[in-house]
Image: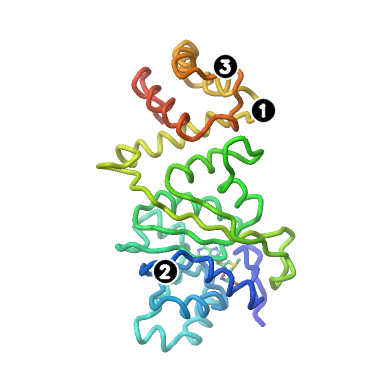
């Protein structure tokens, strides 16, 4: 067995029943699958039971050699395209793929949140089924008033529907991680840029992310206090009064649609939540 490299977040899921359950959790679709970090190929094999085409990105050159041997017939038949490189470097420069895709992965935990945010932003990505640290899954899937309701829950809620599918104990991995993991799914059900979309364009989507960061900058303080660190207090008080919102509301207590409405008002009434 190859020695796992800590710096690449390598914890290989070897338990057959959990591997099967990840694939069973994938929403039905005809989209090609993008897998980030195929590792030793155990999840990749299971994905091929359900789908014909996979594009996989693996940073570790030693694992790439193993994968090329293991999947040589899939590669020859163009069922698997294996890209050896750092997914974040690649994603910064270009789209992962120029067609609709579903993301399925046991993500490297050190960059999991970043990768899910990229996938949320990528309009070609239609569904996301990933394993991450349980606490991260909780943040993406929380609903208003939950302790974990956060900027990640709001972005996810605006773009699609999320659910936690099941938890995975450390003992299912080699080597076992220190934390419990969770597999969750986001089914995107809305266009979110451009014509008919939630946001005017990519720039507005980023402005919204910036505004959410300010809203949750101190989760225990009031929302108005947080927002007034960047936006004019009198404008905020007016907006809260017009929407009949209590001035002492905390960031985790405001529903997703109100977050969006306040954002739109702020854009219209101030120089905008620009960053
Ligand atoms: N899919 C395998 C499994 O389920 O057992 C391995 C999952 S392991 C948690 C994460 C995988 O992501 C490893 O194979 C690791 O080498 C790969 N990885 C880590 N950082 C990466 C990066 N920046 N780009 C692409 N792959 C990466």
Foreground: 134 or 231? 134
Question: What whole-number distance in Å separates the C-alpha atoms at marks 3 and 1?
Answer: 14 Å
Whichever of labels 2 and 3 marks the residue nearer the N terminus, that label is 2
Mark 3 surroundings: few (<14), some (14-19) or many (≥20) residues within 10 A? some
Q: How is the image coloured?
A: rainbow
Quarter of image, ligand 1: bottom right
Report the residue at 64% width, 69% height from top: 5
Number of numbered discs on residues: 3
Is label 3 in contact with label 1 (beta carbons under 8 Å)? no
Q: Which residue is mark 3?
A: 247
> Residue 192, located in which quarter of the rendered image?
top left
Foreground: 113 or 52? 52
Question: What whole-number distance in Å separates the C-alpha atoms at marks 2 and 3?
Answer: 46 Å
Whichever of labels 2 and 1 marks the residue nearer the N terminus, that label is 2
Report the residue at 36% width, 67% height from top: 31
Foreground: 3 or 159? 159
Check the image and report above or below for 221 versus 71. above
> Disc 2 on helix, strand or loop?
strand
> Disc 3 on helix, strand or loop?
loop
> Residue 7, located in which quarter of the rendered image?
bottom right
**For disc 1, does the CB lie below 8 Å from ligand 1?**
no
Q: Which residue is mark 2?
A: 33
Q: Could you say which disc has been placed on residue 220 in the image? A: 1
Mark 2 surroundings: few (<14), some (14-19) or many (≥20) residues within 10 A? many
Q: Residue furthest top?
A: 234
Report the residue at 30% width, 62% height from top: 98
Q: Quadrant of the C terminus?
A: top left
Question: What whole-number distance in Å separates the C-alpha atoms at marks 2 and 1?
Answer: 40 Å
Mark 1 surroundings: few (<14), some (14-19) or many (≥20) residues within 10 A? few
Relative image position of residue 229 (x, y in whole percent): 53, 20
Nearer the camera: disc 3 or disc 1: 3
């Amino acid at each position: 067995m190859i020695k796992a490299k800590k710096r690449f977040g390598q914890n290989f899921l070897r338990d057959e029943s959990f591997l099967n359950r990840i694939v069973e959790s994938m929403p039905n679709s005809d989209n090609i699958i993008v897998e980030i970090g195929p590792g030793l190929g155990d999840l990749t094999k299971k994905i091929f039971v359900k789908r014909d085409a996979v594009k996989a990105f693996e940073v570790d050159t030693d694992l790439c050699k193993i994968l090329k041997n293991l999947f040589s017939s899939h590669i020859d038949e163009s069922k698997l395209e294996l890209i050896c490189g750092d997914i974040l470097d690649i994603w910064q420069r270009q789209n992962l793929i120029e067609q609709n895709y579903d993301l399925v992965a046991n993500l490297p935990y050190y960059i999991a949140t970043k990768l899910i945010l990229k996938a949320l932003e990528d309009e070609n990505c239609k569904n996301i089924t990933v394993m991450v640290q349980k606490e991260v899954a909780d943040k993406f899937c929380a609903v208003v008033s939950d302790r974990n309701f956060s900027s990640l829950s709001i972005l996810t809620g605006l773009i699609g529907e999320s659910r936690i599918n099941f938890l995975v104990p450390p003992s299912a991995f080699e080597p076992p991680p220190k934390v419990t993991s969770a597999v969750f799914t986001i089914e995107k059900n809305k266009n979110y840029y451009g014509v008919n979309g939630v946001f005017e364009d990519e720039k507005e989507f980023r402005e919204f992310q910036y505004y959410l960061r300010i809203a949750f900058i101190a989760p225990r303080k009031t929302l108005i206090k947080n927002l007034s660190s960047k936006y004019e207090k009198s404008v905020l008080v007016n907006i809260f009064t017009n929407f009949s919102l209590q001035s002492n509301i905390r960031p985790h207590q405001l529903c997703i649609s109100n977050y969006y409405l306040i954002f739109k008002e702020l854009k219209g009434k101030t120089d905008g939540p620009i960053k």
